[in-house]
Amino acid sequence: MARATASGGYLVLEEFDDLTASLAFGRDEHVARHAQVLAAKQAAFAAAGHRNHIARHLPAKPNATGAFPSSAAGHVAVRQDGAGTDPWLRYLRNQTAPLLETAHVDKARLQAYADQLRDLSFLYFAPMLVSVVAQKL
């Protein structure tokens, strides 16, 4: 992508990072269940060849060539009472089999977790979206 960027053009990189995903607040059993589901998600991603923490390295990538002064930012959504949880719920539904294969959660725990996402007493931080904007010299 860097080679394909014209002089004066912009390179934009974005990726999620689980840096903030473990942050959760609420009843002890909700926080513990969140940790188990997150561990299952990270194990399922790793088994599929995805690195859960790649985005934290994005800001250094354009600067490695010396031709891309860049700026970077991270955005973290805080989710509570179902607000913004639909993509996460879709992921849980669509990836139930790989999550269960990790042995970090069972089907009952996964369902209880989906239910707790609608509970006002539980909130969690979504994975951080790291965005890098770099202009080629």
Image (cartoon, rainbow, N blue to C red):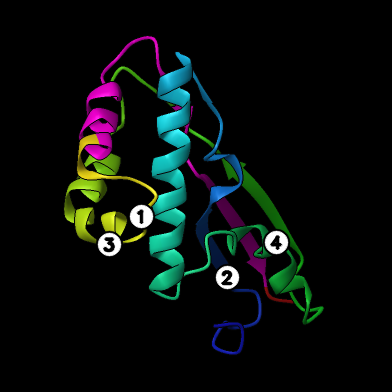
- What is the x, y in percent for residue 17? 55, 53
Q: CA distance from mark 2 to mark 3?
A: 34 Å
Q: Disc 2 designates what residue?
A: 11
Q: Disc 4 designates what residue?
A: 59
Q: Given this view, does label 2 or label 3 mark the residue nearer the observer? A: 3
Q: Residues within 10 Å of mark 2 (few under 14, many from 20)?
A: some
Secondary structure of the residue carrying numbered label 2? strand
Check the image and name the residue furthest to the top.
121
Looking at the image, residue 2 lies above or below residue 129: below
- What is the x, y in percent for residue 122? 40, 17
Residue 94: quadrant of the picture: bottom left
Magenta run includes residue 111: yes
**Which of pointers 2 and 1 lies earlier in the amino acid sequence?**
2
**Cβ–Cβ below 8 Å for labels 2 and 3?**
no
Q: CA distance from mark 1 to mark 3?
A: 9 Å
Check the image and name the residue furthest to the bottom.
3
Q: Residues within 10 Å of mark 3 (few under 14, many from 20)?
A: some
**Which of pointers 2 and 3 lies earlier in the amino acid sequence?**
2
Residue at position x 31%, y 17% from top?
A: 81
At label 1, the amino acid type is Ala
Q: Disc 3 designates what residue?
A: 98
Magenta run includes residue 55: no
